[in-house]
Amino acid sequence: MSVVVGLCQITLHLPGNRSLKGKRQVVKKLCDRVRHRFHVSIAEVADLDRHQRACVGLAVVGNETSFVHSVLDTILNAIDEMQLAPILDRQTEILHYDEQFAQDHPLGDQHADGWDFMSEWEDD
């Protein structure tokens, strides 16, 4: 068993935008389209108070590195084709988790933040 997680942070330029409301409309439209078309997690993650710049992060999960890379590339091309905002920068990271990770971190382990995964599903 292998889990591959692709993370991508995309910085967008909104040159004609003059308000946070206008920025939110563009970011919402972009995120909704990407989420609907590709079934990935996507959200605005930085530059929240900047009118002419938006930073969105997205995550893709799969079992093969080539698949995750392909999905990320396809999403970036789709964002470019939407022509809602030009891409200024992108940062991509691919994380790999294998059976050893699952053995070392089983569900139900107490984590540093004090939250126990399984407590959410246990009956009283």
Image (cartoon, grey):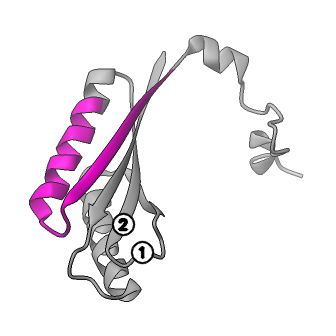
Q: Which residues are magenta?
A: 69-96
Circle 1/circle 2 CB separation < 8 Å: yes
- Name the foreground residue: 37 vs 52: 52
Is 16 on the left or on the right of 43, as rendered? Answer: left
Q: Mark 2 falls on what kind of element? A: strand
The amino acid type of the residue labelled 1 equals Arg
Residue 23 disc label: none
Residue at image mark 2? 54
46 over 89 or under it: above or below? below
- Name the foreground residue: 94 vs 49: 49
Count of number-bearing discs: 2
Q: Position of residue 64 (x, y in %)?
A: 33, 21
Q: Residue at x 36, y 66 (%)?
A: 54
Q: Is residue 16 magenta?
A: no
Q: Mark 1 falls on what kind of element? A: loop
Residue at image mark 1? 50
- Name the foreground residue: 10 vs 71: 10
Q: Position of residue 39 (x, y in %)?
A: 33, 51
Q: Circle 1: is it few (<14), some (14-19), or many (20+) Cα within 10 Å? A: some
Q: Residue at x 22, y 75 (%)?
A: 15
